Amino acid sequence: MEPPKASDQGETSASDIASAVVVCVLTGISTLTQRADFVRAASARRMGTGSFLLQARLRSDDTCVQAGAIRIGFTASKKIGNAVARNRAKRRMRAVVRAVLPELGQAGWDYVLVAKPQATIARGYADLMADLRRALTQIHLEKAKP
């Protein structure tokens, strides 16, 4: 007996999966994992919004990560609430970053989003996106000023 043939509708091939992986790798967005990176970002530029605090720094001494990569970190302290609330705040911030950072983020920068109590979880998704767009624009405008 012959196995059934795969139809062209709804099926994903190995080449489709490989191309999706290449797109993710080419965007050059990775996450911050080392405490030292978070500390360096905390001492750099800051932009507060109604939803969160954005900390950003231009990397210059980076040897272990590609020079052109964008790195992102998320922080939600116990002021946000219990573990469920902190995880929800970080999930919302990750979703906003996936939507906005590829278009407005600049290569070679580290960004850290710090959740605000009662705001990150309660604020609407469109407002979160608008806040991140405004904060990224302001951070990079400050860089251009002499």
Image (cartoon, rainbow, N blue to C red):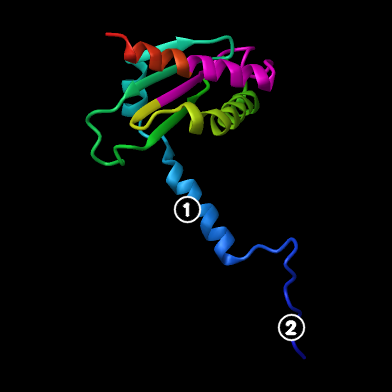
Identified at 44% across, 28% down, the residue is: 105
Q: Which residue is mark 2?
A: 3
Q: Quadrant of residue 85?
A: top right
Q: Residue 122 magenta-drawn?
A: yes
> Residue 8, image x and y in percent?
72, 67
Q: Nearer the viewer, residue 74 or 85?
A: 74
> Residue 67, image x and y in percent?
29, 37
Q: Residue 140 magenta-drawn?
A: no
Q: Quadrant of the N terminus?
A: bottom right
**Tag of residue 84:** none
Marks 2 and 1 sit apart, C-alpha to C-alpha, by 31 Å
146 lies left or right of 125 = left
> Residue 87, image x and y in percent?
60, 29
Q: Which label's residue is closer to the chain start, 2 or 1?
A: 2
* Disc 1 element: helix
Q: Which residue is mark 1?
A: 22
